[in-house]
Amino acid sequence: MRLCPPLPYTVTDTDLTTQAEQLLHFIRDEIPLARAMDVCLHACDTERLSLAVPLPPNANDKGCAFGGSLVSLMTLAGWALVELTLRRHGEDCDVYVADSSVRYLEPVWGDFHAEARAIEQDAWMPFLDTLAVRGRARIELSCQVPGPDGAPAATLVARFVAKRRS
């Protein structure tokens, strides 16, 4: 598996890093698109998760990032953040993207990463509480692919649903 660039922020929780790396192996083993895109773990902490890809397998005919790869990476980052949070809390759930909205703001001409985080800062506890009571819950995430200047080149707002397995 390809190594990602150094993490853009420090992760001090080795258990979290190990769980995130295990999740990445699952993603690459079970989602052929992720393997074809050459997805790697870029960074994670308890509030955010970032996945990265090299440009060559994700380029379009113009030589910049293919829109489908941008939205796929943002969706995967969001899904992975929900899945990792559930695993950290001992929950065994199926996670689905219920709906999403994407905006392409500028071309991406190099390797890129997508970072996902909850839209509301304190959204995880209500999400987990609802899951405990109802066996299913939803959370809204914001994902973005930063451009070279740090401003978003693409954004995704998505609602993810977790449903506890029987």
Image: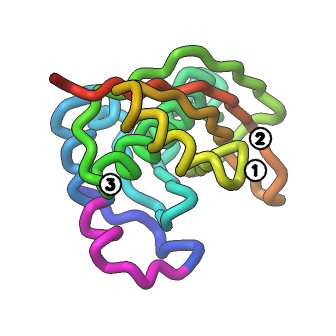
Q: Quadrant of residue 65?
A: top right
The amino acid sitting under disc 2 is Ala
- In the rendering, which numbered label is found on residue 34? none
Q: What's the residue at 70%, 41% (across, down)?
A: 108
Q: CA distance from mark 2 to mark 1?
A: 5 Å
- Locate the N terminus by quadrant: bottom left
Q: CA distance from mark 3 to mark 1?
A: 33 Å
Residue topped by disc 2: 153
In primary-sequence order, the first of circles 3 and 1 is 3
Q: Quadrant of residue 74?
A: top right
Single out the residue that lies furthest toward the front.
Answer: 133
Asked whether the residues under the numbered discs 3 and 2 touch, taking CB atoms below 8 Å apart as contact, a structural biologist would say no
Q: CA distance from mark 3 to mark 2?
A: 33 Å
Answer left or right for 130 relative to 29: right
Answer left or right for 137 relative to 86: right
Q: Quadrant of residue 57?
A: top left
Q: What's the residue at 27%, 39% (across, down)?
A: 27
Q: Is residue 64 magenta?
A: no
- Percent of width and height locating residue 111: 56, 51
In primary-sequence order, the first of circles 3 and 2 is 3
Residue topped by disc 3: 89
Residue topped by disc 1: 147
Span shown in magenta: 10-19
